[in-house]
Image: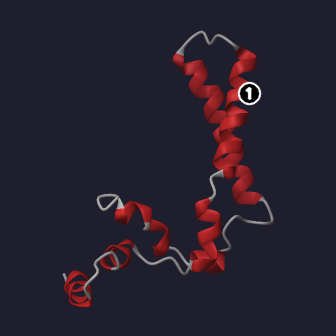
Amino acid sequence: MEAARDDVLAFLHFPQEHWRKVWSTNPLERLNKEIKRRTNVVGIFPNDAAITRLVGSQLLEQQEEWQLERRRFFSEATMAKIPEPEEAFALTNGDPADQTATTAS
């Protein structure tokens, strides 16, 4: 558990408004279920390119839906609160003296 501490607590780098949504994997589970349903309909694919086209088109369709839908998963205002990667990495250190040393380098 100690070795995975940073991974387990990674959600803390996001704004608090995102925490509940980051914990859930429901949107990804729905997407995987839809891909599985569509590939089961086809049954046997003639080659790898056919699988890539089918799954890729489904992913593209989902991406467009997520980008264009009126109610976004994360609002633009809360997305602006996400720290830059350098700031996020600096916050993982427990000692405040280490944080200033990390951000200064």
Mark 1 residue crowding within 10 angstroms, few (<14) / some (14–19) / many (20+): few
Q: Residue at x 51, y 74 (%)?
A: 14
Foreground pick, 36 / 64: 36
In the visual, does 12 lie left or right of 43?
left
Q: As shown in the figure, which amino acid type bears the numbered disc 1?
A: Arg
Could you say which quadrant of the image residue 32 lies in? Answer: top right
In the visual, does 90 lie left or right of 69?
left
Q: Is residue 96 above or below residue 36?
A: below
Q: Is residue 40 above or below residue 88?
A: above
In the visual, does 65 lie left or right of 14?
right
Q: Residue at x 60, y 19 (%)?
A: 50
Q: Which residue bears the numbered disc 1?
A: 37
Foreground pick, 26 / 42: 26
Q: Residue at x 63, y 57 (%)?
A: 24
| Quadrant containing the C terminus in the rendered view | bottom left
Where in the figure is residue 8, as x and y percent of width and height?
A: 43, 62
In the visual, does 82 lie left or right of 53?
left
